Amino acid sequence: MPGADPRTAPALWSPATATDLVMLATANTGTTVPLLPGFDRLAEISFGTDYHLVAANGDARLRLCIHMSPAHSHDCLIIPHDNHLAARLAAAARYEKAAHGRRLGTDRTASPPAYRRARLALLLAIHDGLEAGASARDLAFSLVFARHQPLAGAAWKGSDERRHTLRLIAEARKMVNGGYRALLLRG
């Protein structure tokens, strides 16, 4: 839920959607799951026999889904064989690296490139502006075309700036109303 506090209601995505989620099956059915050396818990929640954990060490993040299963005699990594296999294997390799005490850097494969991040930030700023009561013209000349002189009247109505801003407004609304889920699908 977009308005939820991430500390109390973390976004815990399904393995089918989150390709950076590492799934473990373990016989360790203790009450707490031990953290990797040097990692802190950012968010955690339990659903039945599944325990979801987001752990951090500096800029490095690991998203884990730990399935408590006394039937397993050894801890096992579960890697679905699907179109995102390469990303899943990379996430499992990062987990193994951390499990052996090696330092992790920021996972660049789990975040959009700089241009995409800037566009997403613009879309969120447009949505925030709409929520605050800004008009399309206000948004156009404060966010989208900040270096242009504002247009008025008929010049604004027939302008490319207006059409482009309205497309961005529609995209921002779509993203906030559920389109953000597409960010999780990479590849």
Image (spheres, helix red, strand yellow):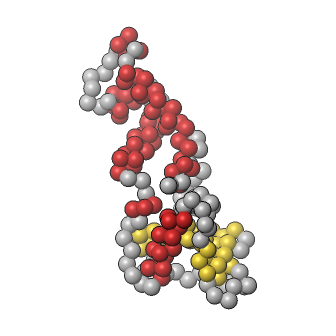
Residue 9 can be seen in this image: no
- Would you identify the image quadrant in which residue 84 lies? bottom right
Front residue (pair 141, 159)? 159
In the depicted structure, whether residue 16 falls above or below residue 66: above
Residue 12 at x, y percent in the picture: 59, 61
Front residue (pair 80, 6)? 80
Front residue (pair 153, 14)? 14
**Residue at the image position 63 percent from the left and 87 percent from the top:** 74
**Residue at the image position 43 percent from the left and 45 percent from the top:** 120
In the depicted structure, whether residue 139 falls above or below residue 54: above
Residue 120 can be seen in this image: yes
> Horizontal placement of 40 versus 72: left or right?
left
> Horizontal placement of 70 versus 43: left or right?
right
- Would you identify the image quadrant in which residue 109 lies? bottom left
In the depicted structure, whether residue 169 falls above or below residue 91: above
Residue 47 at x, y percent in the picture: 69, 68
Number of disc labels? 0
**Residue at the image position 56 percent from the left and 50 percent from the top:** 181
Residue 143 at x, y percent in the picture: 35, 34
Front residue (pair 5, 178)? 178
Residue 92 at x, y percent in the picture: 51, 73
Quick one: which residue is furthest to the bottom in this view?
Answer: 73
Quick one: which residue is furthest to the top in this view?
Answer: 154
**Residue at the image position 39 percent from the left and 74 percent from the top:** 104
